[in-house]
Image: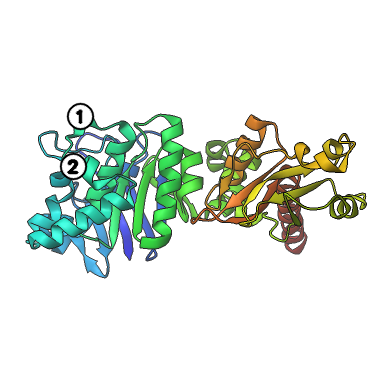
Amino acid sequence: MIKIEEVTKKYPGMVRPAVDKLSLNIEEGEICVFVGPSGCGKTTTLKMINLIIEPSGGKIFVNGENVLEQNPNELRKKIGYVIQKTGLFPHYSVFDNIAIVPNLLGWEEERVEKRVVELLKMMNLDPDENRDKFPKALSGGQSQRVGVARAMAADPPVMLMDEPFGAVDPITRNQLQNEFLKLQQKVKKTICFVTHDIDEAIKMGDKIAILDQGKLVQFDTPENILFNPANEFVEEFVGSDRSLKVLNLLRVTTVIRKNIKRVKEKAGIDEINKYFSHPEKNRILIENDEKEVVGYLAKEEYHKISTAKGWNKAIRIFPTSLNNHNTLKDAMSDMLQHNIAALPVMDDDDKFMGIVSFADIRSYIGEAYEENETEKDQDENEVL
């Protein structure tokens, strides 16, 4: 969808190019994250794609067409653009901000209305409550959602996002990241995403382009960058805590246990005793008559209940739950915060999917690194 060939940007008086002979291909439906230290050329590259900045050399193709041969204004109508502080027009309502590009394209009023309402709902913003607000009445998270909605208004195949979540607090930022990844599974846009945060790059990207002093240092999947950094710069930039960053790469569905035994809240004592008679069984899930998981029963707590009549008094309610889009880092953070060793995972319709445990996460990450080290050893032996 996006092809960058030997692209260079030189500014007068600069010792080196801001971008130096950059080449890479971004596939349709992928999120490609540009990351690197300040001044590495990531935002310059983003702006060259929609000709806010004109390249000094090289070629850029979007959907097979050379952007340098197109009218910049017409090009930008076909590419969504989101910036860090949203760039919403303060004198326009939320509705009018989102409707800008469809109106420029000459959409009929009814079609614009339908699209704006659809996008507000998609961004979890109630249309009746928010459409007539002005940007100053919005929170940071709401403004960012409106900015994303505006970029998507004309349903462009390509979106450029320049540190889109960088101006909000960490909690809101995490929520926006999760919501956007969930949305991307439905809309499948081709996205160029700029950030200075390697953790965000690992979480958001299908591919990551690491830049340094205008040059591409490594272009690869987040997994390969974490397990096989190209050189010392990448290794240092990613950080010594690479094993922890893997947690931000993998979804909870990677280690989910789906076939978990469940019993009714009104189950008989014999059923509970039979389950806990197995030494390896320490917990059992409890569900209500609607088959909704309401909590869990721990063996040690159960054994403190002396009568069959009161066993369900030992049921513990899960303090929180995970969404299937959450990462292993999200899972471990919630487990540590609530001092619990396992949490339920719910799908987008809030239906129970399974359980993720601290022990399973630890085991999976350890085995993944062992396999990678084994492969490295085999490669070295083949070379020797």
Camera-side residue of 359 and 133 = 133
Q: Quadrant of the N terminus?
A: bottom left
What is the three-letter code of the residue carrying label 1? Lys
- Relative to 36, residue 373 above or below: below
Q: State the image coordinates of residue 225 (x, y, percent, origin top left).
A: 56, 50
Mark 2 secondary-structure assignment? helix
Percent position (x, y) of residue 277? Answer: 93, 51
- For image coordinates 16% across by 46% down, the residue present is 95
| Looking at the image, residue 344 lies above or below residue 339 | below
Q: Quadrant of residue 14?
A: top left
Q: How many marks?
A: 2
- Image quarter hosting the C terminus: bottom right
N-terminal of the two: label 1 or label 2? 2
Q: Mark 2: which amino acid? A: Val
Which of 368/257 is in front?
Answer: 257
**Viewer-closest of 141 and 26:** 141
Q: How is the image coloured?
A: rainbow
Query: Residue at label 2?
Result: 94
- Tell me the SS state at disc 1: helix
Circle 1 sits on which residue?
136
- Quadrant of the image occupied by residue 195: top left
